[in-house]
Each structure stands twice: as C-alpha cells, then as structure tokens.
Amino acid sequence: MSPPFYRDRSADAARTDSLLDSLRSEANRRSKMLLLRGGSGSHSMPSARLKINRFTVMAMLQAARARSLGLTQESAYSWGLNRAIFYAAAKRGFRSGSSSEPGKSSTPKEASPTRELYRLGDDEAYRDLRADTLLFTIGDRDQKPEDFDQKIITRFGSKESFEAAWKEAMKIVDGYDPATLQSRTRFYQEVYRPRRDVLSERWAQEYGTAPTTR
C-alpha cells in the first residue's frame, strides 16, 4: 500500500510547500530563542551535531537510489534530501490534527516557469530550471549538494564515517532490480521501511549520536 500522501501528488506538492513555510517559521522562532538564551558575543551557545535518525536514512537511501538509476552524485544528493524533506513535512502535517484528507484542503499552485516536474521511475519531484545542473526544489528552496553535506553528511561525524555508510547504502539499493527502484511504492515498502530503524540505530551507534525517530 502506497504512503497516503502520494494519492494526489500535485495537490500534495502545494500542501507541502505550505507545511514547509510553517516549519521554517518555527525553526526561525526557535533559533531566535536560542540566541536570546545564549546571549551575545563569546557566550553564544555552541551548535550540536544533528542526530542520525529516520530522516537521515531516507535521505541516504533515496540518494543511493537516484545514483543507482543514473543521476550524478550531486543530483542524487539533491534528490535524496528533497525526498527526505517531503516525507518529513508530510508526516508532520498529517499528525498535526488536520481533519481533511491530503489534497482536499488546498488548491494546486499554478505551474511555475522556474520549475517543472522531474520523474524518476514513477516517482517525481520539482526540478529548478534556473540551476546549471539537475537540482530539486521544495518549499521554494533548492536542495544543493552543500545542503546535503550540512544536513546529512555532518551527522556522521567524519567524511570517512559517511563514506562507509554511503557504501552500505549503495550496496543495499544495488541488491534490488531496477523495477523496484523505479517504483516509489516498492522502494518505500521493500527498501526503506524494513531498514529505517535498523540503520538509524546502528549508524548512530557506529558513527553518530543517539538515534531518534523524527
């Protein structure tokens, strides 16, 4: 059974953009609170390394999936982070207490001349037409390789640790036939879902901090 937020993908894209705006506003609010608590000057609070969690696993396996299906490393990183953000925003939205089904409470946005749908198998995400390379975008923000570095790679503590986890992710997806990788439903159900907690817990123990299910 496919994840519920794929039943109306064009409407979900508009709804996800709205969710991401809310998430960014909350993140900005919390950042300001931390700055106020930490004070100014030399007493500012140090930033903690992000934890390895399901978000990390989704980004890694989606990036490995895209790489296996022929995207360049940079584009694969962009795809992986884009899909991880999408799933996280959708999950946050569907647990927020909304009484309406996805796609029923929002109207799809007009097609933008700066982006178009890109299909990877039967999966899809918006690509930025202004970018010199294939980059994906969600919430009016591109997911660039440096964003993948900041939001995913740094969770592993070192480049060597990330490379070890990346090699494992590639080995996992390479063990599946192209038909499975091209199907968003089969990839989610057969590749990601059975491993999301196993990998997050083991990678956290080996390379990072304690895992969370966020």
Image (cartoon, rainbow, N blue to C red):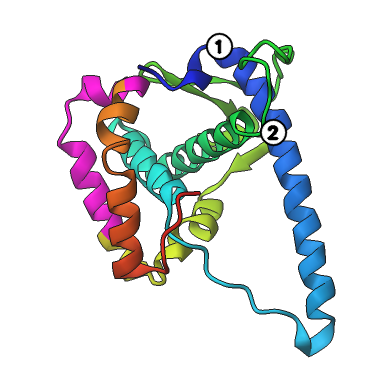
Q: Residue at x 69, y 30 (%)?
A: 17
Q: Residue at x 48, y 21 (%)?
A: 124
Q: According to the image, label 1 marks what residue?
A: 8
Q: CA separation, marks 1 and 2?
A: 16 Å
The x and y percentages for residue 176 are: 17, 31
The x and y percentages for residue 199 are: 29, 52
The answer to whether 8 is drawn above or below residue 186 in the figure is above
Magenta range is 165-185
Local SS, label 1: loop
Residue 36 versus residue 112: which sits nearer the camera?
36
Task: Find residue 76 and report its image quarter.
Answer: top left
Q: Main secondary structure of the magenta part?
A: helix
Give the amino acid type for the residue marked by disc 1 in the picture: Asp
Q: Earlier in the sequence, mark 1 or mark 2?
A: 1
The x and y percentages for residue 3 are: 44, 22
Label 1: few (<14), some (14–19) or many (≥20) C-alpha neighbours in 10 Å? some
Residue located farthest toward the bottom when viewing the structure as drawn: 42
Q: Residue at x 55, y 46 (%)?
A: 144
> Would residue 194 be found to the left or right of residue 51 on screen?
left
Q: Is residue 176 magenta?
A: yes
The x and y percentages for residue 119 are: 44, 19
Q: Is residue 102 magenta?
A: no
Q: According to the image, label 2 marks what residue?
A: 19
The answer to whether 3 is drawn above or below residue 31 in the figure is above
Give the amino acid type for the residue marked by disc 2 in the picture: Leu
Residue 213 versus residue 149: which sits nearer the camera?
213
The answer to whether 95 is drawn above or below residue 53 in the figure is above
Q: Are marks 1 and 2 in contact (CB under 8 Å)?
A: no
Local SS, label 2: helix
